[in-house]
Amino acid sequence: MAGTLYLVGTPIGNLEDISLRALRILKEADLILAEDTRRTRKLLSHYDIHTPLRSYHEHNERALAPEALARLEGGADLALVTDAGLPGISDPGAFLVQAAAARGIPVAAVPGPTAFALALVVSGLSTERFAFWGFPPRQGRERREFLAAALAEEKTAIFYEAPTRLARTLADLAELAPARRAAVVRELTKAHEEVCRGVLAELATTFADREVKGEICLVVAGRPAGEQEGTAARLEADPVRLVEDLLRQGWERKEALREAARRSGLSRRAVYSAWVAKKEKGSL
């Protein structure tokens, strides 16, 4: 009789965020497959668990999968964990699950914290319909199309992002939809947990020159209902173009910003931030 592959959710920060069932499975499993054995060993040591560990990460998962499958078919129970959160969510695990399922090997999920879900519920944005987009592509046409597609959805969009790329991603999103509400959620469940809310233009300005560390989720409001798909960026950029139109008509900058804010229903700061971002990127 085949063993079971357990996908065990582990804490994303606070070590207290682990279930009694997860601790039992980690203790009783024949082997733990860990994305980073050093990090997992700290968790196991904290709870006095001594189950054997084996490194299993994105660079070796396909090579090690046959051995893991053979152990499972031989009756061994394996627990799969990642550095933090639930395996398979922007982390190793999906390939082994698919292979196990194809062979009829039992797969069980042991619930634990998932960063994108926690970020969504603290963001203050709609939780009725949402889409998890993972990490944005780093550059090129694929990146532009990825961000535009996310903004075109009526669902709340959730991204993961590296701290070194957060400012650029916020700037790129703000260029497409400066007035869209969003939240930057950082270091969830840890000592320096932070939630920054505002419109994309404001957040882009806030994080433009700020050194950021830690794990980051970015939550962005969906396209407003009634707005035609594909026009979100054009419509939400109107306040910026309005400022330029008023300046060409001879308005003083301060008055042009105030008038654009009044007509768009946005704050003067949001319009100013979007206008400055466009100018700095040479888009005006």
Image (tube, rainbow, N blue to C red):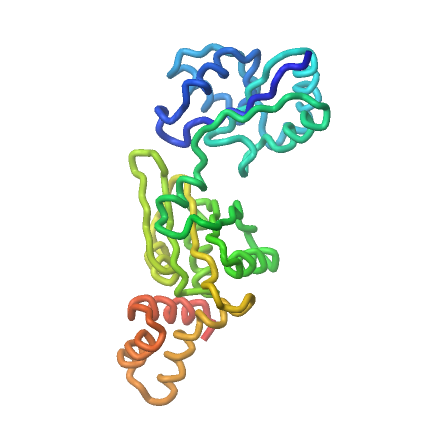
* Residue at the image position 37 percent from the left and 16 percent from the top: 46
* Residue at the image position 37 percent from the left and 69 percent from the top: 276
Q: Is residue 3 left or right of residue 260?
A: right
User: Is 23 or 14 nearer to us in this picture?
Assistant: 23
State the residue lying farthest toward the right. 103
Q: Position of residue 53 (x, y in %)?
A: 54, 16
Q: Quadrant of the C terminus?
A: bottom left
Q: Position of residue 94 (x, y in %)?
A: 61, 33
Q: Position of residue 266 (x, y in %)?
A: 33, 69
Q: Quadrant of the N terminus?
A: top right
Q: Is residue 92 left or right of residue 105?
A: left
Above or below: residue 270 compared with residue 133: below
* Residue at the image position 32 percent from the left and 74 percent from the top: 261
State the residue lying farthest toward the bottom. 249
Q: Position of residue 165 (x, y in %)?
A: 46, 50
Q: Is residue 261 left or right of residue 131?
A: left
User: Is 188 or 212 nearer to us in this picture?
Assistant: 188
User: Is 41 or 68 nearer to us in this picture?
Assistant: 68
Please count the marks in the image.
0
Q: Quadrant of residue 274?
A: bottom left
Above or below: residue 165 compared with residue 111: below
Q: Is residue 94 left or right of residue 51?
A: right
